[in-house]
Image (tube, helix red, strand yellow):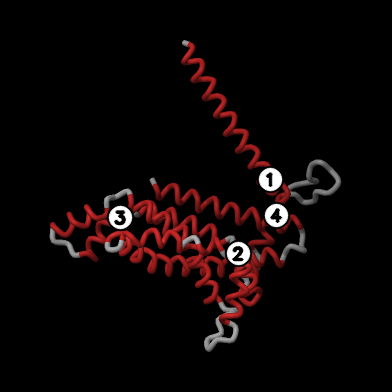
Amino acid sequence: MQNVNLKMSATTYHKTVVYGLVSLLAIPVIATLVYSLAQRWGATITPDGFTFDWYLQLWQDPRFLAAFGRSLLLCFISLAVSCALIIPTIFVVFYYFPRLDSWMNLLILLPFAVPPVVSSVGLLQLYADGPIPIVGTPWVLIGTYFTIALPFMYRALANSLQGINLRDLMDAAHLLGASTPRAFVSIVLPNIRKGLLASLFLSFSFLLGEFVFANILVGTRFETLQVYLYNMRQTSGHFTSALVMSYFFFTLFLTWLATRFSR
């Protein structure tokens, strides 16, 4: 009986801690949501009224729709390039050269070792006067976004490959007459699908909110969502709150999709 009481007390304590932490994290989100729906909110404790006009104004703004579309396009192209390069590379490393994994782990840490501001200045000096001036174009962002997505995708795929006994699966496929490319497509890819989807959604959410590279390397010449938010910061706080909440709900929807696909 005493053990049961102790177990119930521990469960209650854990739930209290979790619910308290979630409530604490939800306070700024709820406050931003209420502010985005308020008609006016000045000296009073509660808003004067609620309206969806700020959201309607936001989603009817051609500049916002264009910036949102550019951000989605950049994310899709960057992730497609990342998949085309990282997936074959990580397969070759784990199947043919497993000793290179330690070097790859060091390599994927480099984007975190160099601050984005420093990287942006170096890229400006490197590509501004080159034979192909790509500064100010989306092409330079695709390259930088690839370096951002590299750590997330490599680490997630590496964990998936470590858990499926890659060499045993490939040997079994070869014994059954499958070539290495066919075994990779038919056996390896389905087994790392969950890790791949998780890394894609995580990278997509991170890239959609990237600001430093987009602002310094391109700016308003190819205005992305975060650059648009920065440029609109002097407008109504209700309008910018509606923009932030729209971005939050879109990211939440992506998280739900990732969870559903993982099942």
Q: Nearer the viewer, mark 3 or mark 2?
A: 2
Q: Earlier in the sequence, mark 3 or mark 1?
A: 1
Where residue 60 sits in the image (x, y, percent)?
65, 64
Q: Can you identify the residue that label 3 sits on? A: 190
Between the residue at mark 4 and the residue at mark 3, the CA separation in whole angstroms equals 41 Å
| Residue assigned mark 2 | 115
Residue in view at x 40 percent, y 62 percent: 103
Label 4 neighbourhood size at 10 Å, few (<14), some (14-19), many (20+)? many
Q: For the residues carrying marks 4 and 3, which lies nearer the camera in this image?
A: 3
Mark toward the start of the polypeptide (4 vs 2): 2
What residue lies at 63% left-to-right and 77% top-to-bottom? 221
Q: CA distance from mark 1 to mark 2?
A: 28 Å
**SS state under label 1:** helix
Residue 232 is labelled as none
Whether residue 21 is situated above or below residue 80 in the rendered picture: above
Q: Where in the figure is residue 135, as x and y percent of width and height?
A: 59, 79
Looking at marks 4 and 3 on the same chain, the residue that comes earlier in the sequence is marked by 3
Q: Is residue 95 left or right of residue 110?
A: left
Q: Foreground mark, 1 or 4?
A: 1
Label 2 sits on a secondary structure element that is loop
SS at mark 4 in the image: helix
The residue that mark 4 highlights is 241
In this rendering, position of residue 198 left or right of residue 171: right
Say what amino acid the circle numbered 4 marks: Ser
Displayed quadrant of residue 84: bottom left
Q: Which residue is mark 1?
A: 28
Type of residue at label 3?
Pro
Alpha carbon separation for disc pair 1 and 4 = 11 Å
Badge 3 vs badge 1, beta-carbon distance below 8 Å: no
Going from N to C along the chain, the mark reached first, 3 or 2, is: 2
Circle 4 or circle 2, nearest the eye: 2
